[in-house]
Image: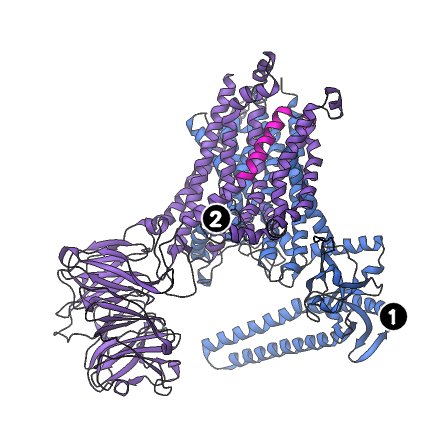
Chain colours: A purple, B blue
């Protein structure tokens, strides 16, 4: 052999070896990729859901540049929407804007307000719009806006101070010549409401229907409210509906002022605040945060008026947030139902009402600040101490509305008569309280799965037993592909048939359907018994193992019988079975209900259960049943005493896997269940499952919001649950296979 | 119980088949005179859409009939139930016609005349034949006008826009001067050309719209129906069985090849078919290599042990994970994370409007590939396990390396199994809807995901899908009654495709079994 051929051979061998190694690597890479994928899906879902449960945190304060000299104490101290510019207003009308990053003043405006300003209100928490009460009895409105401009090529914030309405001054003396003790202002949907408590302790409410048109131009509706001989001290007006009046003796009234001409005092009770000045409204204006107790018993109580069952309203102290020390101020958030507590000793704690949580407590300060402002997003707090020094505190509190109790326990939502489980994630209004109770979804998911298993288990398990043990091989060769085809039916088709075709039929012919459910098994069993009684020779008509086909006419007969006698059955229920159900059993009937879902989803899971169960039964070694039969057992005895006990783990695993399918099925439930997140187990009402909820809500959800993460959490729960169920099913099957191997 | 299961399967299939095909059958048109108390129009020309028979206790007929009277805009309502007792007379006049319109559904009536403006081109009995001839001619012209709008007018619009853009750039660079003037003149000329062409097209469209049918409804009122608005017209009562079959075939062809109209409740499903096909093909291209690699690893390369057992359980579990979870993963990870970062890397100039960071074809195909991978793995593995050890060892004994054995012995033998797996995966993917709702399917896509524009296959586009079409038309459309036939027809198509794919897979698998039967001892 020449050198060159040997060299060639060598390179060829090397090349082949290299190729071999490469292939091995690629193939192994493919295998590992799949493994990584499973782990990846799980960990990705987890990584999105996990931030829901990270606790809030408060950073150490960073001191900003200290302005020279000691400024006058502000009547207004606030932040713009984006949290970039802080501003402070002093009584003489000087408005100073401060860049939050540097702490330096960037602009100053002198407001043209005759006398000094002694109080500032914020009528709409969604806007940086203020009502300034001047010492000479006028109410001036002004709005600060900070448009972004790119005129010079770089991003620049402009500052505009403008009257929000055509004419933005209300002369309070005209309405309250005796002077103003307290005042509350609220602006919503261009309707401006002003509640005034005057020097003679009389209460009145002014309502400007179209504030944008100009305040003095359109005279307001004016209505007096009776103080009932008490001494009101503070007013709270946070919505079109509720006016809360705090009296000197601690009693608090709730007035419904939606129609001021017909204002009604709905609830009155001693809320007994420990500190009248610290009481504040919560977002939405329907609830009060009230500091209560003394010393170590200090807490913040969340109160709101709620409708009683028998009519009327009542103040309820829904929940308490223990603080344990003297409170300096409460700061409600402007976009969420959360609030901050500043304690006298400099403690700051963050709370959320719906979630009933104290998210974090920290002591970044040595004393309570002089003035403070919380950014609109609730992620930044600017504080001013008594010397005018500014401090900035970053707050990391992304998802306060989610807590274990908000997800799983009954929650008393604002305005609801009692605590309850509710899933209501979004709404058009901005001061909406999101309700993230998973309970209705969990129950809905299990309910849908339960009713479908109710239908599927008998059909699939009995069918599998018959098919594997009794059926003639010739027929079996046909059955298995048919069942496989059934498995291949897209669920969207089953769902649409269930929703558009089956649901109206069941609604119209409910008695017939119920009758069929009873008649079909009864008739089948009767006929089966009848066949058994026939003499053996007659049985030749139907060869052994083909009896199943004989049942088809029986079922059709049962169906026609049910169809014929259903209406007469309905007459027995006063002519309308749905009305009867509603009046006699208090069961509501929805057109798209659990029965419809059960049937449609049953059709979807039958083939899954059937295939695995059939496999388990038919792979029981034939020797076992042959042995039993040889020992004189009948076929039934062999089945019940030998085959089924041996195959029962396999049937169990079939049920588990079928259940996993039913829990995660989406389209059928989406189309046939009505998708109302209610919490009951009634067969004739709908439900909303996790899967359908994801399909409905995820496309609309804002990426990174609490809602988005809660949806990911529910996907994670689905994933984990089906994974668990399937793993159990698989493990049982593997064990069974090994056992058959031994037999 | 077996019997019930069988009944269910074949019952469902035949229900869909009859309802779906029935949609295309030219039903008889009944002229029905209703009793005054029926609460409906006095006389209608209607198709009997549904019938319910019932008797009350005394045995009297309490049945009711769902009539579809067409003329949604001319004489509403289109669908209404009437008591069978209230139908005084009914007949099937041979000259009653169904006019399928491009908008507002079908019209039912008699053609009294064919008009050009106010002048009659034909009157009386010969108008129908005249109208049919005219219709063919008008449709040809309309198609030409439409294609002209798509090509020539669009090109002129583009040219005008480009000229404007050049002018703007010239102004930004130099401000004034001869260059700017030339550009300005060019821009004006381009705009003028575009305006003139549009006006000319518009004029011809108006001209075309002047011919109309004078349609007399059952209640005697006369209506103008412009011929351009007509898709097809037929007189069902006079049709023979053969003519009806031909009509049905024609309708099915139109259903398969046209775009939807009227909020998807009418017209065809062509874009949904294209969307589905492109989607599953793309998915098959993605899933086949990965699935086969994993199966090869599991069966040929990995040493048996806890690792392999774990992997196998993972694969089996992936098959059981709800499809919506894949959709959630696809939306969160593929669309927002992967798509978002790809956008930041390659399409930064169009941000913030996303290119790949939004649901689209690519992510939908990838999501479905994940979803169907277990199918391919399981099927391939089964094929691999059927190859006898002797064959493998023989190859190795002859000096072939493992990769050579794999390439020239194992893979060819397993090819049918792999193909079976891919077909099953395609069948599964074609029927899957839930995850797609999150990652890219839309109710109406303006453009197909595959077309003549480079790069021909548009991975970033959203698409239509048969399964979603069923859900959307059946459950989200305002006129469910009118939409139902389309839903059944679409369902029929989807079922046929999926049954065909599954049968192919079953047959392939059986042949595979027979082929390796010889190795079994």
- Residue named by callout 2: A689
User: Which of the pair A279/A661 is nearer the observer?
Assistant: A279
Q: Residue at x 43, y 31 (%)?
A: B310
User: Which of the pair A511/A306 is nearer the observer?
Assistant: A511
- Residue named by callout 1: B125
Looking at the image, residue A450 lies above or below residue A295: above
Q: Residue at x 49, y 82 (%)?
A: B177
| Residue A485 placement: quadrant | top right
Q: Estimate how packed mark 1 is, as few (under 14), some (14 to 19) or many (20 or more) residues with alpha carbons within 10 Å.
A: few
Q: Residue B509 at x, y = what percent? A: 64, 31
**Residue B370: mark in rendering:** none
CA separation, marks 1 and 2? Answer: 60 Å
Is B491 displayed left or right of A314 in the figure? right
Is A549 displayed left or right of B215 in the figure? left
Q: Secondary structure at mark 1?
A: helix
Q: Residue B220 at x, y = what percent? A: 78, 73
Q: Main secondary structure of the magenta part?
A: helix
Residue B25 sits inside the magenta stretch: no
Chain for disc number 2: A
Chain for disc number 1: B
Is B405 displayed left or right of A346 in the figure? right
Q: Residue B478 at x, y = what percent? A: 60, 62
Task: Confirm whether residue B74 shows in the render.
Answer: yes
| Residue A563 placement: quadrant | top right
Query: Residues at marks 1 and 2, common chain?
Result: no
Looking at the image, residue A650 lies above or below residue A371: above
* Residue at the extreme top: A631
Residue A473 sits inside the magenta stretch: yes
Range of magenta residues: A453-476
């Amino acid at each position: 052999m020449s050198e060159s051929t040997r060299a060639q051979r060598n390179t060829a061998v090397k090349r082949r070896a290299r190729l071999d190694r490469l292939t091995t690597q690629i193939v192994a890479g493919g295998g590992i990729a799949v493994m990584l994928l499973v782990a990846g899906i799980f960990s990705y879902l987890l990584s999105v859901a996990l931030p829901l449960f990270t606790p809030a945190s408060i950073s150490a304060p960073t001191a900003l540049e200290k302005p020279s000299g000691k400024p006058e104490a502000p009547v207004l101290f606030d932040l713009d929407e984006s949290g970039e510019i802080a501003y402070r207003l002093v009584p003489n009308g000087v408005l100073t804007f401060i860049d939050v990053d540097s702490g330096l003043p960037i602009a100053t405006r002198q407001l043209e307000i005759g006398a000094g300003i002694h109080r500032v209100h914020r009528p709409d928490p969604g806007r940086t719009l203020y009502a300034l009460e001047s010492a000479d009895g006028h109410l001036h409105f002004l709005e600060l806006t900070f448009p972004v401009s790119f005129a010079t090529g770089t991003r620049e914030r402009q500052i505009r101070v403008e009257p929000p309405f055509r004419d933005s001054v209300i002369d309070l003396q005209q309405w309250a010549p005796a002077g103003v003790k307290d005042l509350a202002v609220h602006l919503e949907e261009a309707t401006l409401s002003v509640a005034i408590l005057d020097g003679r302790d009389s209460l009145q409410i002014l309502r400007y229907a179209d504030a944008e048109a100009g305040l003095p131009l359109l005279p307001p509706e004016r209505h007096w409210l009776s103080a009932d001989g008490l001494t009101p001290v503070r007013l709270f007006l946070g919505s079109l509906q509720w006016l809360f009046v705090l009296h000197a003796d601690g009693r608090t009234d709730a007035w419904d002022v939606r129609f001021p001409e017909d204002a009604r005092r709905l609830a009155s009770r001693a809320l007994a605040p420990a500190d009248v000045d610290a009481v504040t409204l919560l977002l939405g204006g329907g609830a009060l945060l009230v500091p209560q107790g003394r010393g170590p018993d200090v807490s913040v109580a969340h109160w709101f008026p709620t409708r009683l069952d028998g009519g009327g309203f009542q103040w309820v102290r829904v929940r308490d947030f223990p603080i344990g020390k003297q409170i300096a101020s409460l700061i409600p958030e402007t976009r969420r139902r959360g609030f901050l507590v500043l304690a006298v000793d400099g403690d700051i704690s963050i709370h959320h009402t719906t979630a009933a949580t104290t998210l974090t407590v920290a002591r970044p300060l040595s004393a309570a600040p002089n003035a403070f402002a919380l950014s609109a997003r609730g992620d930044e707090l600017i504080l001013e101490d008594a010397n005018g020094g500014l401090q900035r505190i970053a707050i990391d509190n992304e998802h306060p509305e989610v807590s274990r109790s908000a997800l799983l326990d009954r929650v008393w939502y604002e305005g609801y008569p009692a605590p309850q489980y509710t899933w209501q994630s979004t709404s058009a209004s901005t001061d909406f309280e999101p309700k993230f109770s998973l309970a209705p979804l969990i129950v809905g998911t299990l309910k849908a799965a339960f009713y479908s298993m109710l239908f599927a288990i008998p059909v699939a398990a009995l069918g599998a037993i018959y098919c594997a043990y009794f059926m003639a091989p010739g027929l079996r060769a046909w059955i298995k592909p048919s069942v496989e085809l059934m498995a291949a039916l897209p669920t969207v088709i089953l769902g649409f048939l269930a929703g558009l075709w089956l649901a109206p039929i069941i609604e119209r012919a409910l008695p017939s359907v119920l009758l069929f459910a009873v008649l079909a098994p009864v008739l089948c069993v009767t006929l089966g018994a009848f066949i058994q009684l026939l003499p053996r020779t007659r049985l030749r008509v139907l060869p052994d193992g083909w009896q199943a086909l004989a049942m088809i006419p029986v079922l059709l007969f049962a169906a026609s019988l049910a169809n014929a006698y259903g209406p007469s059955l309905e007459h027995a229920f006063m002519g309308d079975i749905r009305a009867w159900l509603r009046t006699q059993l208090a069961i509501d009937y929805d057109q798209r209900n659990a029965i419809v879902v059960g049937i449609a989803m049953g059709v979807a899971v039958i083939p899954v259960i059937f295939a695995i169960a059939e496999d388990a039964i038919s792979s029981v070694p034939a020797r076992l049943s042959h042995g039993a039969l040889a020992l004189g057992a009948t076929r039934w005895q062999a089945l019940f005493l030998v085959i089924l006990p041996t195959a029962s783990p396999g049937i169990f695993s079939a049920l588990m896997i079928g259940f996993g399918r039913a829990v995660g099925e989406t389209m059928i439930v989406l189309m046939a269940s009505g998708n109302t997140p209610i919490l009951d187990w009634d067969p004739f009402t709908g439900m909303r499952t996790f899967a359908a909820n994801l399909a409905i809500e995820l496309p609309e959800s804002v990426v990174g919001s609490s809602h988005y993460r809660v949806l990911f959490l529910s996907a994670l729960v689905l994933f984990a649950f089906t994974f668990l169920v399937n793993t159990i099913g698989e493990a049982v099957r593997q064990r069974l296979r090994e056992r058959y191997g031994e037999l | 119980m077996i019997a019930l299961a069988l009944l269910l399967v074949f019952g469902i299939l035949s229900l869909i088949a009859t309802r779906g095909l029935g949609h295309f059958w030219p039903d008889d048109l009944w002229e029905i005179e209703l009793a005054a108390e029926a609460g409906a129009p006095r006389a209608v020309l209607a198709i009997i859409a549904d019938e319910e028979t019932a008797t009350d206790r005394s045995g009297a007929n309490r049945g009711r009939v769902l009539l579809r009277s067409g003329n949604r805009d001319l004489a509403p309502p289109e669908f209404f139930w009437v008591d069978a007792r209230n139908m005084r007379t009914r007949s099937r006049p041979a000259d009653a016609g169904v006019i399928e319109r491009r908008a507002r559904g079908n019209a039912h009536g008699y053609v009294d005349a064919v008009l050009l403006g106010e002048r009659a081109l034909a009157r009386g009995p010969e108008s129908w034949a005249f109208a049919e001839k005219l219709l063919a001619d008008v449709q040809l012209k309309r198609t030409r006008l439409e294609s002209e709008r798509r090509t020539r007018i669009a090109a002129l619009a583009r040219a005008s826009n480009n000229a404007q853009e050049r002018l703007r750039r010239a102004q930004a660079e130099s401000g004034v001067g001869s260059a700017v003037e030339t550009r300005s003149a060019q821009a004006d000329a381009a705009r003028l050309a575009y305006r003139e062409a549009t006006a000319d097209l518009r004029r011809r469209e108006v001209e075309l719209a002047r011919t109309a049918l004078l349609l007399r409804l059952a209640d005697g009122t006369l209506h103008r129906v412009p011929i351009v608005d007509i898709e097809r017209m037929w007189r069902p009562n006079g049709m023979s069985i053969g003519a009806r079959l031909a009509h049905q075939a024609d309708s099915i062809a139109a259903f398969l090849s046209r775009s939807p109209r009227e909020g998807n409740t009418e017209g065809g499903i062509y874009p949904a078919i294209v969307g589905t096909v492109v989607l599953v093909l793309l998915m098959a291209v993605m899933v086949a290599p990965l699935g086969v690699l994993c199966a090869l690893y599991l069966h040929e390369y990995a040493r048996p042990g806890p690792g392999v057992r774990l992997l196998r359980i993972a694969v089996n579990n992936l098959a059981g994970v709800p499809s919506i979870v894949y959709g959630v993963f696809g939306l969160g990870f593929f669309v927002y994370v992967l798509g978002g970062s790809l956008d930041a890397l390659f399409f930064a100039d169009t941000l913030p409007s996303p290119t790949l960071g939004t649901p689209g074809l690519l992510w939908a195909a990838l999501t479905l590939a994940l979803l169907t991978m277990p199918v391919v793995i399981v099927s391939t593995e089964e094929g691999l396990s059927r190859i006898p050890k002797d064959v493998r060892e023989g190859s190795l004994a002859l000096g072939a390396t493992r990769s050579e054995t794999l390439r020239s012995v194992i893979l060819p033998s397993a090819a049918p199994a792999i193909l079976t797996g891919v077909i099953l995966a395609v069948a599964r993917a074609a029927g899957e809807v839930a995850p797609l709702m999150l990652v890219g399917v839309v109710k109406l896509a303006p453009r197909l995901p595959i077309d003549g524009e480079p790069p021909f296959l548009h991975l970033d586009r959203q698409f239509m899908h048969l399964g979603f079409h069923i859900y959307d038309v059946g459950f989200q459309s305002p006129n469910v009654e009118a939409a139902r036939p389309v839903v059944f027809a679409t369902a029929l198509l989807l079922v046929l495709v999926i049954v065909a794919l599954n049968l192919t897979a079953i047959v392939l698998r059986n042949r595979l079994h027979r082929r390796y039967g010889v190795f079994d001892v």
